Image: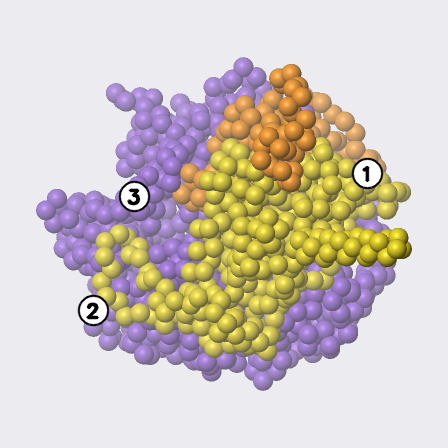
Chain colours: A orange, B purple, C yellow
Amino acid sequence: MAAWSPLEWPVLRQFRSGDVFGRGPAVTSPTTRHIAPRTATADRVVQSVCPFCAVGCGQKIYVKDEKVVQIEGDPDSPISRGRLCPKGASSAQLVNNPLRQTAIRYRAPYATDWQDLDRDTAIDMIADRFLETRRRTWQDRDEHGRPLRRTMGIASLGGATLDNEENYLIKKLFTAAGAIQIENQARI
Amino acid sequence: MANADCIILMGGNMAEAHPVGFQWVTEAKARGARVIHIDPRFTRTSAVADRHIAIRAGSDVVLLGGLVNHVLTHDLYFREYVVAYTNAATLLGEDFRDTEDLGGLFSGFDPRTGDYDPSTWAYAHPDGRVESTGGEEHGASASARAAGDQHGSGGPALEHSTVLRDDTLQNPRTVFQVLRRHFSRYTPEMVRDMCGITLEEFEYLARSVTENSGRERTTCFGYATGWTQHTLGVQFIRTAAILQLLLGNVGRPGGGIMALRGHASIQGSTDIPTLFNLLPGYLPMPSAGLHDTLADYLEEVASPTQKGFWAYADTYTISLLKAWFGDAATADNDWAYDYLPRLNGPHGTYQTAMDMLADKVEGYFVLGQNPAVGSANGRQQRMAMSHLKWLVVRDLNLIESATWWKDGPEIASGELRTEDIGTEVFFLPAATHVEKAGSFTQTQRLLQWRHQAVEPPGQAESELDFFHELGRRIRERLAGSTDERDRPLLDLTWDYPLDEHGKPDPEAVLSEINGYHVTGPDAGRNLSSYTEMKADGSTACGCWIYTGVYAEGHNLAARRVPNGGAGIAQTEWGWAWPADRRILYNRASADPQGRPWSERKKYVWWDEQAGRWTGSDVPDFPVDRAPDARPDPDLGGAEALAGDDPFIMQSDGKGWLFAPTGLVDGPLPAHYEPQESPVRNALYPQQQAPARVLFPREDNLGAPSADEPGADVYPYVFTTYRLTEHHTAGGMSRWSPVLAELQPEMFCEVSPQLAAERGLETGGWATIVSPRSAIEARVLVTDRMRPLRINGREVHQVGLPYHWGVGTDAVVSGDAANDLLGVALDPNTQIQESKVASCDVVAGRRPHGEALLRLVRDYQLRAGATVGTDSARITDPARETVEPDPGDDEQGSVWHTRW
Amino acid sequence: MGQLSGPTDPTADAGWPADRPRKGFFTDTSICIGCKACEVACKQWNDNPRDGDLELTGMSYDNTVSLGASTWRHVAFVEQGAEQIAQARRSGRALVDLGMPTVRSAAPSPAPAPAGGTPPDVAPVDTTPPDTPEFRWLMASDVCKHCTHAGCLDVCPTGALFRTEFGTVVIQPDVCNGCGTCVAGCPFGVVERRSDGTAAPTTREGQRKGEQPPVPKRGVAQKCTLCYDRLLDDEIPACAKTCPTTSIKFGDREDLVAVARERVAELHAQGMTEARLYGANDRDGVGGTGSVFLLLDEPEVYGLPPDPRVCTTDLPEMFRRATMAGVGMLAGAAIAFLAGCR
């Protein structure tokens, strides 16, 4: 900020600016005079899509210092024309919510509380259980000797909030593993 | 939708559930379109509609059937359209018997199994035979073939496309005449008595719809789960489809029936299905006994001699197998077809829950979904999870499905003790939509790519990263295995390019979904269209309907030309399947000669000079097939499509007023009462949908229906729904302070009359009791709810939003409405009936602990509710009902009906 | 005196160059769907904490109750029966009879062709709603009015409030000392001070029910800024940008008032004579407001004062009388003095 000049003294400013009653430019504070919206100061803007309902409203994600600072409608979208409903407008809170869980939690059998787990251990444990269950519950043929080649011991629910690419990998992996009880919200 | 002249919103609450989509309705209305909202409740949609018409929940087929009857009896249908584009003129076989003949059932019902054998519903065959659904099978096996879980979007194939027709529509065996007779009992008076809609309201509705249909005008329907979540949900939609076809409102701008879906990528997760019965692109999962070999499978999916694009299912299937199993899929091993697991019945989420209770399921992945709150009969869901060995929950917040072992309702009631629950629970934090790149497919079949904005925090990661890594480690553990059952996992193509953190590139996955040339001069090049696919292993494709989204290696889902470009169809934003079309079956927007029906509703038409179809959208038709072309129908496939066969995915190219195959609960819609209803079906002696899927179990008891003894114990109808301020089971909204404060507490909506009857007051508490559970809710007494006169009796409806659940982590929690629901399913879709059931309402809060269980039990005893209640397949006049096999939990073996 | 009452350009009065158009809102409640996206977008943009107790109020779907220190947009829900609707139509017609607003005889413009080109003559379909519906559900998004003569601004002793170059009224939290004079100065009850939490000192801090979320800028008066920071960057306010049905429109006040008048005329032509404008009359007690509303009933029904009047309106009169009294007293004293001298 430039060096303070006596001319900036509010009373003088009031008369200099013509705002004699002190209701306009004369009373603005330095903070006010240098205000800028965080949409303008963001490092980058990323085009995205609202994660709530199926309308598919366009969103603009404003990022500053690798944090999401604002999410609002994308006026370019022919679907939503920049508008968002209350849920869509709350998207930034979905990302920055102080209640959000960002750590893996593990509950051992019969335990009364959670404990921490690192990612490597967690995925290893799940992979082991996956294969164990698959081995134990494998069905090769039905009672007529027709091929089944499956496990009825592993089920999955979810997908309507996931990406196509994610659903594709889930379906591909589970089908190859012989797990067939794969379901999502489309049926609920 | 913005191009419609009249919009009927029914079975949905668009302004509340899809506020931003509703801008198009607002716009149409500003241009003079009439908007009518038909719903049990007066909602925010009703508030801005021209008119709200209150309807009794679950009676929609009566109203829509009434409209069909009105259109037929007053000759208000669009004759030219109906004759040319629908199967109205097609003749049915001699063996078909309608509900008119059989007391509310169609021919072919087997009360032992509860299934229909659809063979008598077929078209008459030119050489006198009845067109069979294929093969030599009969009876039960034929009905099993039609089961909803075994077919893709085309339904089962018609073997041929040759049919008998009577273009005068006079033959009593024409679909048209059958339709006329079938709907004749759906009179305005019947609508009044069953739906609670006055004659004046019906007249207004009928006039609005018919005056806004035809050459110059179009009417559009919008629905949501208010139609699908019923034991005959598919038939709700079918009735509307029949009406829209009769009025010529399909395939034209401002027409159609819009499914207003509720989740960001619920369409995508059906196209690339995380569903048990489908493979990508609506190819069915193979079933044991029906699809034992690839040849059987392809024969069943689509006969190469039927009309339309399903005839090329062999190219789609083999390309999928190539995409998944790469070099291991060869002509010699039938492209690794045997790697696929087989179904032998429905394995939907509710059957799976029953399997968990029977200790058949050990492990369960819950991915961004909250079944402890969001699924019907929540107690059953939570108890089911307590039987698991291991549970993996991936979500943003510690949802109730992850914490039921600690703070769930069954812990509070003493039914479960944390220390006794052996389930191992993994909670893995997920990435939000801005922390990963990928595509959603929205309700209008549009794929939109999201770019990644930031990295996920802490240990959070995307499903893509997690499942890629899980797959990698599973394959690592199996490496070197000689067990034949491990081949599919080991041969799986899982070599996606990785970034510096070892994460797979989502665009590479999209590229595989789109498909590519495996061999030949173009090897490695992405496919541009599904018509490029071959059945010889030279192409690979993960989902044939998405082919083109990554054409020439360009991610078209990421296209973002402002406003979608200049054209009316706004095609330069994202990518719509199939082949970037915005309106399906748009050949029907022109008359049989290929001219627009009217200047006002011009969309796609035949350009005589150029000899091709043109217009504002990608024509959904062979582009050079002249309107007067009449190829030999025996050619099969797209070659067989005549110039006036706009419905190119149907095996005869016509819109189906009558569905000769593909549905398991009847070729025409017929009204049946919901599983639980205080009303007797006035249309037929048959009370409930005969082919509905039942789970008669102690933990899923039903309330006695209509005038059965004990029905007065649960005298009211309740319906569940969403609010604008929350999202489904609350996982993405109840943790958000700004959303939670807008709708902080579970409440129920009741009419002033019901409030007076039960001593309820606004702001006070009410306890709602069903045969499954009892919940408490704050009370809103409102004129937006009003009692309806049904068959001379007053019927009260109670409104219950379903967003709350019992837990301690969310900003707000509360009792879950879905705990009240029983599980009874539509046999076509395996979707549960959650929009209507019976309950009682009393003032005050519910008891806790043991006392709560006593209250529920007490009600059950008073009502005499047993596993036999509402379980009869055929409503016998003598009211003899089911005699269940006591103590047998397994579904399928308990339906011993005696009459 | 234009600076304290009656029609004026408040931006110029405050010493800004006179050629700046005054910005404002037009909230058309006849197309509001009560989704509350405006409330959420506002809170997100302005980092306002939740301020409710997370309890159902029982007031239809309204659980935030009123505008306040942290709720700068608030959606009211009003359920009405046939009698109240008929009454609203009567009072709306009466307003027309009084000459406000002007109803043009022209019917709303015909529907444009959806697919381009000229639409052929199509028999018009009657779009008139049935005479008087039995029931209706009114929804209206309220906001700071950004008055022409803003009581809050004129009474502020610290200069914390100022008139912006857009003609809006904004509080500067870094200047405000929390004296609260503006709270009493607002005829609409819009301004409120951020609670410092002392009313419930035992409440734990947190987001869940029964907990007190962290409150920034405690003790400072707060209200809508019409997104002053966004306007500086040629962005539109968060609420208007998000509104799904364009019930909230943002723009030059002059244009918005013209649009609003047309919309009232259109609704009247459709028989909805209950439509009327609020805040568009520059001769009302606050000189008209920057936020103009189209209402479907009397303002009181929505919780708005029917005849708002800024407390400074009478200042000239009060000064005049005080001066006269002073002069009179001086004169009296002088006379007494002179008389005493004698």
Q: Which residue is mark 1?
A: C205
Q: For the view shown, which residue lies furthest in the left direction?
A: B609
For numbered disc 1, what is the local secondary structure? strand
Residue at 67% over, 65% down: B749
- The chain holding disc 3 is B
Q: Answer few, some or many: residues within 10 Å of disc 3's Cα (few below 14, many 20 plus, some between 14 and 19).
A: few
Relative vertical location of residue B340 with respect to residue B84 in this rendering, above or below:
above
Q: Chain of mark 2?
A: B
Q: Nearer the viewer, residue C12 or B103?
A: C12
The structure residue drawn at horizontal position 45% and vertical position 72%, both measured from the top left corner, is C271
Which residue is disc 3 drawn over?
B567
Front position among marks 1 and 2: 1
Q: Position of B630 compared to C107: left or right?
A: left
Relative vertical location of residue A40 with respect to residue B420 in this rendering, above or below: above
Label 3: state its secondary structure.
loop
Q: Which residue is under mark 2?
A: B167
Quarter placement of the C terminus of chain B: bottom right
Residue type of the residue flagged with mark 3: Gly
Measured from the top left, where is residue C251 in percent x and y?
48, 46
The residue drawn where x is 81% and y is 46% is: C210
Mark 1 and mark 3 residues within 8 Å of each other at the beta carbon = no
